[in-house]
Amino acid sequence: MGIYHRPGKLKDALAVLATTGARPVAGCTDVFAATEAQDLRGEVLDVTRIEGLRGISETASGWRIGAATTWRDIVDARLPCAFDMLQQAAREVGGAQVQNAGTVAGNICNASPAADGMPPLLALGAQVEVASEKRGVHVVELEQFVTGPREIVLRSDELVSAILIPSNSVRGHSRFLKLGARKHLVISIAMAAVRLAVENGTITDAAISVGACGPVAIRAATLEKALIGASTESADQLVSLALLDDALAPISDVRGDAAYREAAALELVQRAIADVLEQVP
């Protein structure tokens, strides 16, 4: 049996990390699935009681999602249309029990290539707020925070305290689509998140990301650039595998081969763009 810490204040949690190197946990929906033991070994830091670490709030610079915010919290929140894709992804994260316990920060820190939260958060320009007793608080871009499968830039004495969404990313409408072997409770074969802002029939901002088609989810920068300035009527004609290529590095596994994942990603992006444009007044 390990040692279990459950502090109520962030400063106390950071002190535990600084002195013990305990493992931070929240809903444990990924942690328990990855252990072969009947209990968590070593020292464990439960962050679910820490004041201010759960909830969604609007700030002067954008939106703040506390690290211990659950997927059910995301589903139930009243948020701008740009967050639709994140709420749609939240409904796809496991079943009701997982959504009630699993957290947004946990989904990121687990760093699965098929993490449902990654594509919409990337398309929202998300940043990761990291705190430590020694170095204070700093912010890392999400695309730099997750560096590979199960790999993140988080030191043993650091804790993710929040996910930050800049105000300039909360523009337009959005859509998340996921392909799996069945409708629910399934690991993704491919995912796509699309956010588009439109003014007078012209796309003024585009954010597109693809997941489960490479070591990490990634923004489709080339396609985004091609869409900005395009008319809504011609947008669907611009989407091609060539423009999506910088966001794809798929593997072949039991869920699908690389060629199938590429084709699926392209189809999901095309459908998501069409869905978003249908929402534009």
Image (tube, grey):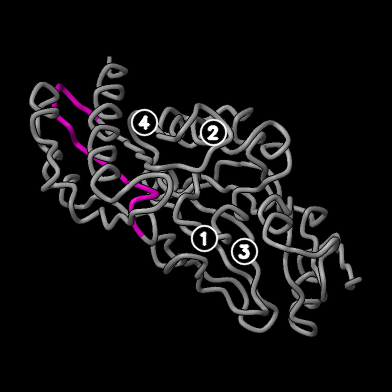
The residue nearer to you, when weighing 260 against 177, is 260
Task: First in sequence, mark 2 or 1: give its number.
Answer: 2
Q: As rendered, which of 165 and 259 lies closer to the eye?
A: 259
Q: Can you tell which mark lies on residue 111?
A: 1
Query: Are the residues tagged 1 and 3 within 8 Å (C-beta)?
Result: no
Q: Amino acid at mark 3?
A: Val
Distance of label 1 from label 3 (alpha carbons): 13 Å
Q: Secondary structure at mark 2?
A: loop
Q: Residue beneath label 3, please?
A: 160
Label 1 is placed on what type of residue? Ala
Mark number, residue 140: none
Quarter where residue 21 is shown? bottom right
Q: Is residue 238 above or below residue 274?
A: below
* Start-end of magenta stretch: 198-214
Secondary structure beneath disc 4? strand
Q: Which mark is residue 92?
A: 2
Disc 4 marks which residue? 174
Whichever of callouts 4 and 1 sits on the residue coming sooner in the sequence is: 1
